Amino acid sequence: MTDFSRRRLLARFAAGIGTAWLAPSIARARRTAPQLPPAPAHRDPPGDDRFTRPLRIPSADGLLAQVRLAQAIELTARVDVLPVFSGRASGVWNYAGSIDGHAVANPLLIARRGELLDVTLVNRLGQDTTIHWHGLRVDEANDGSGLHPVQHGQDYRYHFRVDNRAGLYWYHAHPHFHTGEQVHNGLAGLLLVEDEEELALRRTLELPWGQRDIPLLIADKQLGSRNGLAYKAGADDWIGNRVLVNWVPEPCFDVDPALYRFRLANLSNARMFHPAFVARGKALPFWLIGTDGGLLDKPVRVDDCYLAPAQRLDVLVDFGGLADGERVLLRSLAYDPMENDAAATGEDPMLEHPGAAPMGAELDLMELRVGKGPRVRARLPAALARLDPVAAGGAATRKFRVRISDSGRWMINDWNFLIDGHAPAFGVRRGEREVWEFSNEFRSMPHPLHVHGFQFRVIERRKSPKQIVSRQVDRSKGLTAQDLGLLDTVVVWPGETVRIAIDFAQPFRGKQTYMLHCHNLEHEDQGMMVAFTVDD
Ligand code: C2O
Ligand code: CU
Ligand code: CU
């Protein structure tokens, strides 16, 4: 078995193995100097000419084509050569389909709540794969975790009733130990769920989908030689040297001086973003209206948010105060990445991803250009949707300690999937409510922890770092705006303790096995995952 241990990787660097692509002098400098050498340029030339390609909007064809799930569809996991960057087309691992005569790739699937999802996965990838329906209520057979791999040449029918609140969910490959590679190389797409509340809100907001209501699939990729997507199995925290929004590098989007709705989804392997809308050099305040599991009860005004891998944010931004010709950057602001485990060992993750901006560095994702269009005064509803208060009274607490072992493995309590495999670490009674308490050690890094099959609520954050404390909207409980919504992925920062409430009520009888894992996909592949059961 490949030894994925984080420290082991460091030992390899120290010995100078695995750095063959570096100029010898740089390799030597890195070995002797603990400081990072100046990062190589990770951007196209600065200035407005960075953003030359129009943003991709969901259409009927190609990447991000939108497909209604009212019909049964077939998606084939395979590699296609698609134009993504300028110059040579790239090999993209994708879920390809032919829908009503249109060739689609990683389509944006749209379902009404209550509708059947009927998707047959055909595997032509040359290795095991799956489709995991991230954030959806499903039974084990439809969860698409590594427990049910689909082999090359085989197919598998995912078939279940969509029973989630309206919101932006997503789907991706999830085979044991190869999730990072398959998602990085492209096997992921968005899934939008609609319900009555959502449709009512749309009537109030009058922001037509695809015009003023736009999904933004954000993912960084490591671009290697000849425009190939480069991934190194066994690597750590795979951050990339290019950021794509809707599969377009550095896109631009023309907006009217009016209100817009953006649904941001971070489909990166490991990079956390810190999105803000920057106009005239300052963050333009916006409203958070939804999170992973759908709408908040009311809009919350913020200047920025954190968006960890797998998380989604539903936001309203008003460009109405800006003049014709002004430009707004969707920027990921700099933040402290708190890679406290690495600082202790002098690790340099850059060695693995040439040209990538370090974790936490400022990154411009997209440019919005304000035009002359009609100036529309934004009307914001006071109430968005019904969201029950957090109910945790009387629930038993289950504690999880998140840490790195002495041998450099990421652990959840004493569990690591490489060692423990499928054996469920614990069992939950169907219909129970539980409080899960995650405590991250200080000598650690931020971990976006994800639970399959269930949305949850954050009850409380304690001992949060400064950059979180300064963004709390509920001081007594330590909650940020994002913590007010339903989540399926929650970041636990170094030193922090986060308590969440999960309701395990669901219609699926018998023993169902799910996963709890870190959604830094390299951590997951390195075993930062446990199986648990929900049983009657
Ligand atoms: Cu989106 Cu188990 O993952
Ligand atoms: Cu999931
Ligand atoms: Cu992690």
Image (cartoon, grey):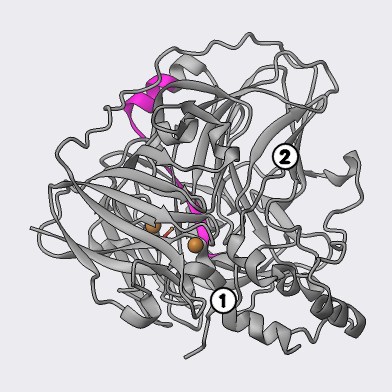
- Residue 122 placement, left or right of 54: left
Start-end of magenta stretch = 187-201
- Could you give the CA–CA distance between mark 1 and mark 2, rounded to whole angstroms? 30 Å
Name the quarter where the C terminus is drawn: bottom left
Taking depth in this image into account, of 472 and 456 the one nearest to the observer is 472
Dot 2 lies on which element? strand
The answer to whether any part of residue 428 appears in the image is: yes
- Dot placed on the residue nearer the N-terminal end, 1 or 2: 1
- Residue 9 placement, left or right of 222: left
Q: Residue furthest left?
A: 536
- Which of the 4 quarters of the picture holds residue 84? bottom right
User: Which percent across, then down, holds residue 506?
Assistant: 17, 48
User: Which percent across, then down, holds residue 375?
Assistant: 71, 11
Instruction: Tell me if residue 517 is in the magenta stretch.
Output: no
Taking depth in this image into account, of 256 and 525 the one nearest to the observer is 525
On screen, 379 above or below 309? above
Q: Please give the name of the residue rendered at 29% of the width and 46% of the height, measured from the top-left corner.
A: 162
Dot 1 lies on which element? helix
Taking depth in this image into account, of 133 and 74 the one nearest to the observer is 133
Q: Amino acid at mark 1?
A: Arg
Quadrant position of ligand 2: bottom left
Q: Please give the name of the residue rendered at 57% of the width and 50% of the height, measured from the top-left corner.
A: 64
User: Which percent across, then down, holds residue 118?
Assistant: 31, 56
User: Which percent across, then down, holds residue 49?
Assistant: 90, 43
Question: Which residue is tagged 1?
Answer: 6
Question: Which residue is tagged 2?
Answer: 331
CB of mark 1 near ligand 3 (< 8 Å): no
On screen, 110 above or below 35? above
The answer to whether any part of residue 134 appears in the image is: no
The reply to whether dot 1 and dot 2 touch (C-beta < 8 Å) is no
Instruction: Tell me if residue 193 is in the magenta stretch.
Output: yes
